[in-house]
Amino acid sequence: MFSLGKSAVACSSLLQASTAVAAATTTATRGVARIPHWEYHIRFSPKDGRKRPAQDVLDRGPIQAPQQWHVDPRASRKEQGKHFIIISKIVIRYAKDDSFQKTSLYYETCTKEQCWMLDKMMTKYWLRPKYYENDPYAPYHTRHGLKGAPRVDDRGTLLRERPKILLEDTVADMHFRDR
Amino acid sequence: MSAAQYARLVSRKYRGPKLPKINRPRRPRLLAWAGPAAFYPNRFYEQDKWYKARIDKPDLIPQLHIIDPTLYGESLAEYLQKEKVEPTNIGFAKKDEKRIPKISSDTQLEKLSRTKKLRIDMSRVGEADQRVIAHFGVFEHLFNDNVYFDRTQNFEVSFGDHGVHTGNILWAEDTKKSPQVSIESVGADGFNTIVAVNLDGNASEQSGEILHWLVANIPDGKSVSEGEEKAKWIQALPFLGTGFHRLTFLLLRHSEKIDVTDFNSDLGSRVFSTAQFYKKHEEKVTPSALNFANVAYDVSVKEALHAENLQSPLYEYEWNERMKRDQKEFPLKPMPFDLYFDQFRDPKDVQADLLRERFKKVSIDDVTPPKFLDDNYVENKKKLDAWNHAKLLEKNKPDSPVYNNSLKY
């Protein structure tokens, strides 16, 4: 079993830290203080013993480039129409300046630790790359020009792009812009 | 050693009551795929090998425009005080100097000029043109530095309705047919020679200009058709992206006939040095008039080049690549994911996406931007992801590249 208790604090910006005020205004928002006991760990189905994905993460949209999560900073998809984000920002959102209105809507990248946690909370199915028609996320499934990180894992499978013929890096650099 | 191996080696009689803890083989980590060579002392040997340990190379910052003060010893005042070389007049002496009437400080005139309603009578401008010619560096590029001549003969060039008036702007299509020329008769026996060159049109490596027209030995007072057309007229060819080209008409005056070789009409054989031509015939020939127009690119240039089985070159400014931070696999600070990843996408991919977007809107060049940035703003605001909606709004702006196509030409 994987305990979420400690790491959820690190993940607070994702899981929408809400204070006690949240309870007063909304019931739907789930923050660090309001994680129900059945969500404090990775859950498995009692029927067949299979892993259950964390619903809180799915609510944020199963959005990811390979190995790199980026999540909707807002509480959940359903609440998009309502105008609140983090509880401290709810009341006065209309009074905020333009740059806040813009930047608060950004879907943000996660750190390595957060990505690792989110991976654990998901099942294999959700981690599999998915290809849809007219997918606005399609261009972001591959990462370009990432020189520092290894491109393949120990089995030689490509980590951050669709499978293709693998060239040696110096050869790839000669003929293609990025690898 | 695994438990199974232990069980095989140690018979039941000699086994302990509990299975001893046996080290399982270590899970292969980095070494398994990178190989031990990644950590050899010579790992710096081939840095770019993907399986070697990586070393951050220093960022090469592009050279900026630097004014090195050590190269400029003198101050501006000193520089301006330096004696300039007197330019030499290679033409005829002027007969009578027409004075330009000085414009009085008329408030009405100023107002007209400010509202762009002031019309100038070109025939009255006269000698002020000399400064314009010097400004465009026509003498400099036709002959040499520090050389000039005065216009001593009336020389009017026009393409139908479009006249050539000392640096006015023409389209390449206007110059399709050969120009009509009227040359003032001086009254004495002699000949005129017209040389029309494009000072900026030479794309080959040979030095010189592109010769567009050469009519030699036109008898004084006769029409151009009486002369020997040594090079037939080809239209002005300012290539796309090269700005205005100075199409220059030079009139040379001489008392004896001159020998000029024939020129083919293909562009390669039209590279021509006016300075050398003048040097060759210097004894006989004196420049007496000059006129030029600035010609801009037009589809006719492409058509003319294609007719000659040439390709129309496309010149583009090479911008420096945008400065950006090194990409991190997992940026520590949260970044807006779409903007962050877009920085590192291949610009060709981005362009291809834009083109696909245009093709959805039927035609290549006449796509009109929509009246509103997003017709169903309210629905889309709810339905789309915030970043995607912001992208949509950005794309529908009238100045976005979707509606301004550089491939139109």
Image: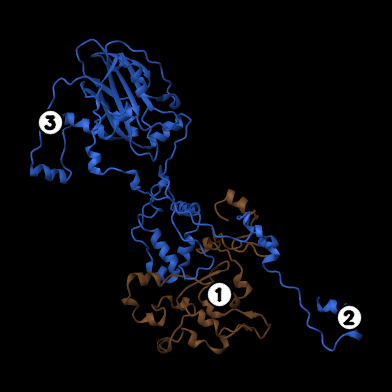
- Judge if badges 3 and 1 mark residues of a common chain: no
For image coordinates 41% across by 20% down, the residue present is: B263
Name the amino acid type tagged 1.
Answer: Glu
Quarter the N terminus of chain B occupies = bottom right
Question: Label 3, on which residue?
Answer: B100
In three-dimensional space, the C-alpha distance between marks 3 and 1, rounded to whole angstroms, equals: 81 Å
Name the amino acid type tagged 3.
Answer: Ile
Q: Earlier in the sequence, mark 3 or mark 2?
A: 2
Question: Label 2, on which residue?
Answer: B10
Residue B343 in the image, given as x and y percentages of width and height = 47, 59
Q: Tell us which disc is closer to us: 3 or 2.
A: 2
Q: Residues within 10 Å of mark 1 (few under 14, many from 20)?
A: some
- Judge if badges 3 and 2 mark residues of a common chain: yes
Q: Which chain is blue?
A: B
Residue B168 horizontal side relative to residue A19, left or right: left
Q: Residues within 10 Å of mark 2 (few under 14, many from 20)?
A: few
The number of callouts visible is 3
* Chain ID of residue with mark 3: B
Question: Label 1, on which residue?
Answer: A113
Name the amino acid type tagged 2.
Answer: Val
The shade of chain A is brown
